[in-house]
Amino acid sequence: MKKMILGFAAMLGITLASSFAFAGGDAAAGQGKTAMCAGCHGADGNSMVSNFPKLAGQGEKYLIKQLQDIKSGSRPVAEMTGMLNAFSDQDLADISAFFASKTIQLSGAKEENLDRGEQIFRGGNMATGVPACTGCHSPAGQGNAPAGYPALGGQFAQYTAKQLRAFRTGAHDAKNPAARNNDGDARTMRGVAAQMSDVEIEAVANFIAGLK
């Protein structure tokens, strides 16, 4: 129980210790700045390929942070190397606002291990200190846009699983090229993913893909 309480306290800490300034974007202006995004993420943010995440309906604050982190190199994404260099912070805010204004098309979940995925998403795993995902990402997987917690529901299962494994790698080996470390000083996602097995990661990612 102590681990669970600490986990939720860490989640709340992200809101209080946000490390970037949030300036709202202009969705109409952003539409004209997304031409190079469309090839991988779809014109409306609904990617058709699981290697590239769906951006439609994602929280604007979260998207801005990810774009800023990718541009600065604090979140390495090989496919996007150098692509954002010419964009200002306002450009990134406008792009984020455009994708946030769209509606995600659900990827859908498979029946295999669906119950286990739901159990982890809604109740966590008390034995290993993994908190429920609903605390930050909402019972329907819609996230918490004002707090910068990402929406998860409907995302490709393969992509969600890849990010969880990257956070897990970041928790154990921060200098590994496959690591993801941009979850803030609270290390919330690294702390959660560090305790998850491959089976749990695949199960919860699959369940999330069908949330709406």
Image (spheres, helix red, strand yellow):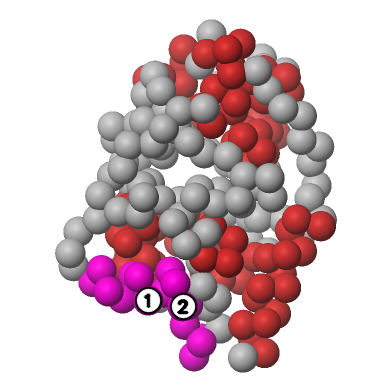
151 vs 86, left or right, is left
**Quarter location, residue 194:** bottom right
Q: Residue furthest left?
A: 111
Vertical side of 64 occupied by 182: above or below: below
Q: What kind of secondary structure does the magenta stretch mostly adopt?
A: helix
- Which range is magenta? 113-128
Mark 1 lies on a secondary structure that is: helix
Q: Which residue is pictured at 51% across the width and 66% down the height? A: 133
Q: Which residue is pictured at 41% across the width and 51% down the height? A: 153
Instruction: Please state the total of marks drawn on the protein image.
Output: 2
Which quarter of the figure is the N terminus placed in? bottom right
Query: In this orientation, which residue lies closer to the viewer: 116 or 192?
Result: 116
148 vs 100, left or right, is right
**Quarter location, residue 89:** top right
Q: Mark 1 is on which residue type?
A: Gln
Q: CA distance from mark 2 to mark 1?
A: 5 Å
Query: In this orientation, which residue lies closer to the viewer: 78 or 182?
Result: 182
Q: Which residue is mark 1?
A: 119
Q: Mark 2 is on which residue type?
A: Gly
Q: Position of residue 118 (x, y in %)?
A: 35, 70
Vertical side of 94 occupied by 161: above or below: below
Q: Position of residue 105 (x, y in %)?
A: 32, 37
Q: Position of residue 51 (x, y in %)?
A: 35, 40
Q: Which residue is mark 2?
A: 123
Whether residue 82 is visible to the viewer of this picture, yes or no, is: no
Q: Is residue 13 magenta?
A: no
Whether residue 99 is visible to the viewer of this picture, yes or no, is: yes
Mark 2 lies on a secondary structure that is: helix
